[in-house]
Image (cartoon, grey):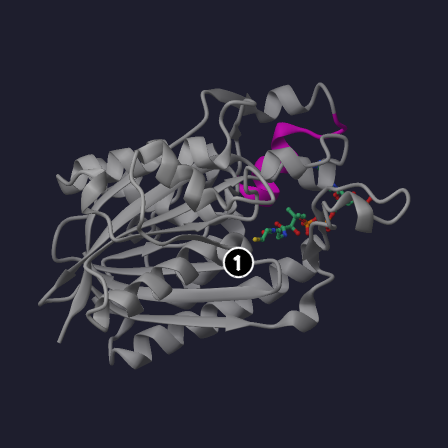
Amino acid sequence: MKYSRILGTGSYLPKKIVTNEELTKTVDTTDEWIVSRTGIRARHVASEEETSSYMGYHAGLRALEAAKLSAKDIDMIIVATTTPDKGLPNTACLLQERLGITGIPAFDMTVACAGFVYALSVADQYIRTGMLKTILVVGVDVLTAVTNWEDRSTCVLFGDGAGAVILQAADKPGILSTHLHADGRQKDSLYIPTWLPGQRKENELPYISMDGRAVFRFAVKALEQVMEEALAANQMPQSAIDWLIPHQANLRIITALAEKLKLPLDKVVVTVDRHANTSAASVPLALDEAIRDGRIQRGQTLLLDAIGGGFVWGAAVIIY
Ligand code: COA
């Protein structure tokens, strides 16, 4: 039996940091409101140069370095992003070109904030079946580029960044299981209108639109269910989880889930306070941070979860 194992991780955060205090100068909000409702204190905001392929490239390089591999060892590139550099070519092709390699398949997956967990699942299938040996999986987004900075109900929530993992075939786990779901009936709760100029409705702005309360309610329920499903599939009690690496959208959602799972908060990796919601990058950014600072150790059991506009959501159980 083949498994895919995380060989190395990497991440990239834009240089510019915008604090809550700075946002109070442009929209009618307060640091106290943002922190008490979301746990967010600051976010990184990409410059024009820091596109998805740029950030994904730097995260990917760091993951390769951690895995002690070079770009020519990669058999496939999957980039989870909702904010590609261009309509085409896809971001994975642009990243491949930056890495100086050719020939291997490279494609994007548009699965909003759940993109990384979805991409991890796809990569896992290629490795388990023995088709490929080494895959670069990147989660990256520049949601601040599609954020209306005059809308206080959304502009306080999002940030930019990239996270990457190198998955490689191994005889021992590895990824134990992944669990993916979607419900397109919820398409109006969280969306970005088309950015195809010819199809845009008159007066429609190309910005994120969200029913915050509906998202909150759905997220807690869906993530609780998928995490229970993931534990049951592996016949694992909650106590077997060493680290929960949740999607970093809102500290209140994270806390509610930890409580439901009876996981103490010191077993939960939290970055939302400094990164805000970085969409497809949020889980791999948190994973990389906790691996690099030594919290996550080899052999430990990780539970990942993510949810995004669609709705789309999923979980993964991994022995690191
Ligand atoms: N500063 C101050 N007031 C704000 C504000 C801000 N940045 N944003 C919204 N408000 C106001 C609203 O206008 C509303 O005012 P009103 O009562 O006069 O109409 C009030 O605050 C309360 O809004 P409400 O929507 O009830 O707040 P909330 O407690 O539900 O928190 C969110 C709002 C967005 C933080 C919360 O719903 C949330 O986090 N939802 C999930 C979002 C998410 O995770 N999205 C991504 C998923 S991938």
Instruction: Indicate left or right for 69 with 273 as reference.
Output: left
| Quadrant of the rendering where the N terminus is positioned | bottom left
What type is the residue that disc 1 sits on?
Val
Q: Is residue 284 visible?
A: yes
Q: Position of residue 232 (x, y in %)?
A: 32, 80
Could you tell me which residue is drawn at 53 percent across and 55 percent down?
110
Q: Residue at x 30, y 69 (%)?
A: 125
**Which quadrant holds residue 98?**
top left
Q: Check mark 1 vs ligand 1: CB closer than 8 Å? yes or no.
A: no
Residue 140 appears at what percent x and percent y?
Answer: 46, 42
Image quadrant where residue 288 sits: top left
Report if residue 262 is visible in the image. no
Height in image: 257 above or below 10? below
Q: Total number of numbered labels?
A: 1
Residue 102 in magenta stretch: no
Residue farthest to the front, as pictured: 103
Q: Can you say whether 316 is above or below 282 in the image?
A: below
The residue beneath circle 1 is 111
Q: Would you say 34 lies left or right of 120 here?
A: right
Q: Position of residue 13 (x, y in %)?
A: 42, 30
Q: Nearer the viewer, residue 100 or 255?
A: 100
- Closest to the observer: 139 or 19? 139
- The secondary structure type at the circle numbered 1 is loop
Report the residue at 16% width, 57% height from top: 300
Extreme left residue here? 171
Residues shaded magenta: 27-39
Q: Residue at x 26, y 75 (%)?
A: 237
**Per the image, is 30 magenta?**
yes
**x, y percentage for residue 268?**
34, 51
* Nearer to the camera, 32 or 159: 159
Magenta segment, prevailing SS (helix, strand or loop): helix
